[in-house]
């Protein structure tokens, strides 16, 4: 089992940047593919980005390609999401999640992830 704690959210103006971090407990962080998801009010939770166990493969939603970058540091048990050129439509609660299924390098559906953090609010004003 792994526990996840997000940090780095906040309020920023459009065009600004934020860096989210997700710290994982336990010694098995490198055995999990990791994902960042977001959920805006009255919208479904969606995958923003995901990264494979070794960090060699990544996925980005079309809406964030070229603006967001996911990375991980397995020595620090942490996954990051660098968010640049933020837009008001990026406003949401952002969650990190862990996928323990070894059959897949990385996935992007909510139900495919086993463990979730509590979320961190990101608010982008115009």
Image (cartoon, rainbow, N blue to C red):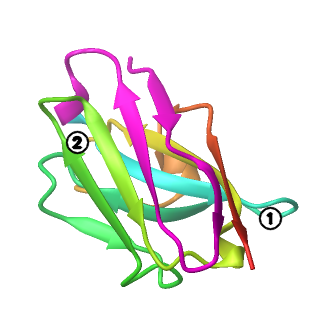
Residue projecting furthest to the right: 42
Residue located beneath label 1 in the image: 43
Q: Is residue 79 above or below residue 29?
A: below
In percent of width and height, residue 115 lies at 49, 31
Left or right: 45, with 51 as reference point:
right
User: In 3D space, how far apart are the residues under numbered discs 2 and 1 (Cα atoms)?
Assistant: 30 Å
Nearest the camera: 106 or 16?
16
In percent of width and height, residue 7 lies at 50, 37
In percent of width and height, residue 58 lies at 26, 66
Residue 45 visible (yes or no) = no
Taking the magenta stretch, the answer to whether it contains residue 20 is yes
Residue located beneath label 2 in the image: 102
Q: Is residue 43 above or below residue 84?
A: above
The answer to whether the residues at label 2 and label 1 have Cβ atoms under 8 Å apart is no
Residue 41 visible (yes or no) = yes
Can you tell which mark lies on residue 64? Answer: none
Q: Which residue does the image show at 36% across and 84% down from the upper left?
A: 66
In percent of width and height, residue 70 lies at 31, 60
Q: Which residue does the image show at 35% across and 26% down from the upper left?
A: 24
Taking the magenta stretch, the answer to whether it contains residue 11 is yes
In this rendering, the count of numbered labels is 2
Q: Earlier in the sequence, mark 2 or mark 1?
A: 1
Nearest the camera: 53 or 78?
78
Image quarter hosting the N terminus = top left
- Which stretch is magenta? 1-30
> Which SS class for mark 2?
loop
Left or right: 56, with 46 as reference point:
left
Q: Is residue 95 above or below residue 68?
A: above
Image quarter hosting the C terminus = bottom right
How crowded is the residue under tag 2: few (<14 C-alpha within 10 Å), some, or many (20+)?
Answer: few
């Amino acid at each position: 089992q792994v526990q996840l704690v997000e940090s780095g959210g906040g309020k920023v103006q459009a065009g600004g940047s934020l860096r989210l971090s997700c710290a994982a407990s336990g010694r098995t962080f490198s055995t999990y593919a990791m994902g960042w998801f977001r959920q805006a009010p009255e919208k479904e939770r969606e995958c923003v980005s995901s990264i494979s166990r070794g960090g060699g493969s990544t996925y980005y939603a079309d809406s964030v390609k070229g603006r967001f970058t996911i990375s991980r540091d397995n020595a620090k048990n942490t996954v990051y999401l660098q968010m640049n050129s933020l837009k008001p439509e990026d406003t949401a609660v952002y969650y990190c999640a862990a996928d323990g299924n070894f059959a897949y390098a990385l996935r992007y559906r909510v139900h495919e992830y086993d463990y979730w953090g509590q979320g961190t609010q990101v608010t982008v004003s115009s």
